[in-house]
Image (spheres, rainbow, N blue to C red):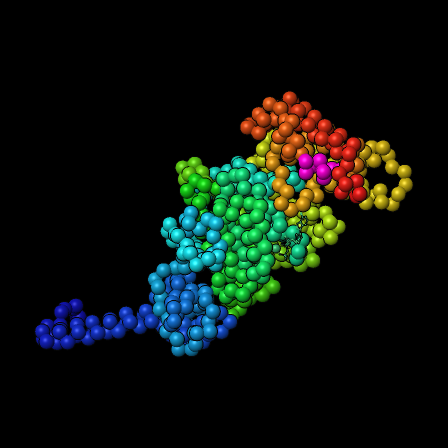
Amino acid sequence: MTSIQPNLALSDNDWLVSSRATLARSRFVAKAETIGRVGHVSDGIASVSGLPDVRLNELLRFEGGRLGFALTLDADAIGAVLLDDGDAISAGSRVTGTGQVVEVPVGPGLLGRVVDPLGRPLDSDEPVLAEMHLPIERPAPSIIDRDLVAQPVATGILLIDALFAIGRGQRELIIGDRATGKTSIAIDTIVNQKHTDMICVYVAIGQRATAVQRVIDAVRRHGAPERCVFVVAPAAASPGLQWIAPFSGVSIAEYFRDRGQHALIVIDDLSKHAATHRELALLTREPPGREAYPGDIFYLHARLLERAAKLSAELGGGSLTALPIAETDAGNLSAYIPTNLISITDGQIMLDAALFAANQRPAVDVGLSVSRVGGKAQLPALRKVSGPLRLDYSQFLELEMFTRFGGAIEPRVKAQVVRGERIRALITQPRFAPLRPIDEIALLAALADGVFDTLPVSCVATVRTRLAAHLDARGGPAAAALVATGSLDAPALTELVTVVRDLAAQVGAAPAPEAAST
Ligand code: ATP
Ligand code: MG
């Protein structure tokens, strides 16, 4: 029979020797655990061995101070993504784990700043004043922490506010081919927050530096840059920085959401982010799936966008609205990344290259666009007047094709075409010309009342441009009450229609030179 007994044969001296050996071994082990070596490095990826305790997403420090993070953990090596350029790193370079996951500085000190995805300033040498640091990957609010989307995000774009209203806490995808005005819609929305309390975060991934600069300049010129943060990982940045950019942006925005404020994040764009993810995954030898994207791309984007939410009153009632952007190839919505993103988000604004080429901008495809939750957040007055718009416009688009072949047209059909042409003129809106909700309500109410039907199509845009000033000068008490309450009663409706009718009469009698020539 064997019994567990202390080895009484061991002398005191033996104990001392054995515990010293253990101590020496444990010191040695601790050292080996914290310092690793680069096995090989290429294309922004380093294979690191000798760091068995590193966690997923842990920040790693390479010899010379360069940073990276652990993307994949295998039994014998870590797939590390470099966040700085890898020129100074070579096989055999020393690597240490920092014990911290990748974090980004957050707080009001970032407002008005242009930073990289690690929060390092790109606009000046002035340091970024951080209130605290947050991990770039954070859990999304649970269902009980959320509230219903009930407040609108006004884009100032008539077509979107009327037909595809966006609510605070919603995720609305902006999708379309190359150069169809995707960024412009997002920037117009940011610019329109000039008169609201919304904090805007614009994340640029894999774009040319000049394109990003144009966006920043546009917001500085037309919007409220002091309430915006620009997180920039241009095409020249390391793939690692581009990969973390949307996550950093969301953490920066969440700081405000969690303090009862309202934030809006534009991610421009997730197609480039997906391509970066595919590049990193292939380099770290993850098995490729559909279109060579690794299988976790859906989960990656889902857990990113799930963090956009409207929080419950107990958690301060803040919100984070996400406007991710995605690119399609020849309008193909059924490609892997577009279908993924469409199923993750609460709706999409689909842009059409043919409409864009025909100068109908914003080139929104009314048939393929949808907003699934924003309707409930729309101002009641706006909802009331925009009701017939979708049907009238869709019918017109069909009839227009039909009437192109000529022939006699019934008066009822003719009236529908006349109305449709005016709708199209009204929703063709230039950039940086946002409409206030009251202007939008007045225009749509007047449209439904037939005010524009007798006006030449070329004059419609002039009425829209001049309306704000006219309404401010001529609007009566009912219109003022409408601004306060958001609901439309009969006196306010009459008042608004009268104001637009007066203006339309003025414009129609003396069309502006640009209108007369078209
Ligand atoms: P990319 O695929 O390169 O990112 P994009 O889809 O983001 O392009 P934008 O850069 O927003 O497209 O716009 C392309 C061009 O269309 C720009 O020159 C812009 O000025 C013009 N544009 C966009 N919207 C409008 C508009 N409403 N009215 C007139 N021009 C517009
Ligand atoms: Mg763009």
Q: Is residue 392 left or right of residue 165?
A: right
Q: Nearer the viewer, residue 120 or 327?
A: 120
Among all residues in the image, which is located at the extreme bottom?
92
Q: Is residue 297 among the parts visible in the rendering?
A: no
- In depth, the one of 205 and 508 nearer the eye is 508
- Residue at 39% from the left image edge and 52% from the top image edge: 129
Q: Is residue 189 magenta?
A: no
State which quadrant residue 515 falls in: top right
- Rendering coords of residue 189 (x, y %): 58, 45
Give me the residue at 55% from left, 45% from top: 223
Q: Position of residue 29 (x, y in %)?
A: 28, 72
Q: 349 above or below 499?
A: below
Residue most extreme to the right: 407
**Measured along the vertical axis of the image, is residue 480 above or below residue 62?**
above
**Total residue callouts:** 0
Q: Is residue 356 left or right of residue 115?
A: right
- Of residues 48 and 430, the one nearer the viewer is 430
In the picture, the quarter occupied by the C terminus is top right
Q: Taking the image as drawn, is residue 138 in sight?
A: yes
* Residue 418 % position (x, y): 80, 36
The answer to whether residue 172 is left or right of residue 128 is right
Q: Is residue 464 magenta?
A: yes
Q: Residue at x 51, y 47 (%)?
A: 225
> Which segment did they paint magenta?
459-466
Foreground residue among 445 and 305? 445
Question: Residue 325 in the image: x percent, y percent?
Answer: 59, 53
